[in-house]
Amino acid sequence: MDHNVSCVPDPAFLDQSCECPQDECMKIGYQYVDVSVPIQLSPHTTLDKVEIECCGEPTVSCQENCCKNTVEVVVTQRVRVKFPIHYTVTACMGESVLECADCEETMEL
């Protein structure tokens, strides 16, 4: 519906339904209404193939444990992990609702 269009009845209808002249007895009534529509948003994510790439050379550290006669070797490697994630959202519109507005100036005649 175009909100810029006036909702005044056709003058021909007024001539048939009213015995007084149109410019003396015509009144216009207004009613404010609230229109609401729920919209449900559903997120969707997908994960593509994860890729791992080594960065630089690994470091090696060595610790002796004389009491237990052992050696612990720790190898540390910096890696870059690529997570290709795709985000989408689906919007689903529900049924709209029309309610009379709570306003003291609701009806003017």
Image (cartoon, rainbow, N blue to C red):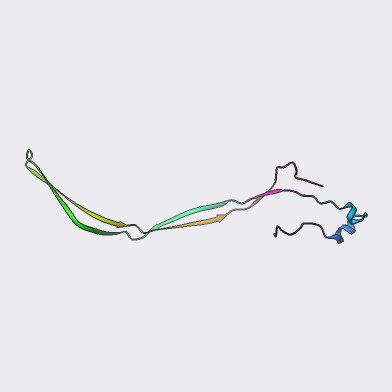
Residue occupying image coordinates x 55% and y 55% = 92
Residue occupying image coordinates x 74% and y 59% = 5
Count of labels shown?
Answer: 0
Q: Position of residue 104 (x, y in %)?
A: 74, 41
- Quadrant in the picture for residue 17: bottom right
Q: Residue 30: say if magenta.
A: yes
| Left-right relation of 95 to 73 | right
Residue occupying image coordinates x 75% and y 48% = 31
Q: Position of residue 68 (x, y in %)?
A: 8, 39
| Left-right relation of 14 to 46 | right
Q: Position of residue 100 (x, y in %)?
A: 71, 46
Q: Residue 73: say if magenta.
A: no
Of 13 and 61, nearer the camera is 61
- Viewport quadrant of the N terminus: bottom right
**Residue furthest out toward the top:** 67
Q: Which residues are magenta?
A: 29-36
- Quadrant in the picture for residue 12: bottom right
| Left-right relation of 85 to 5 | left
| Left-right relation of 35 to 105 | left
Residue occupying image coordinates x 6% and y 40% = 66
Q: Position of residue 38 (x, y in %)?
A: 59, 51
Of 92 and 18, nearer the camera is 18
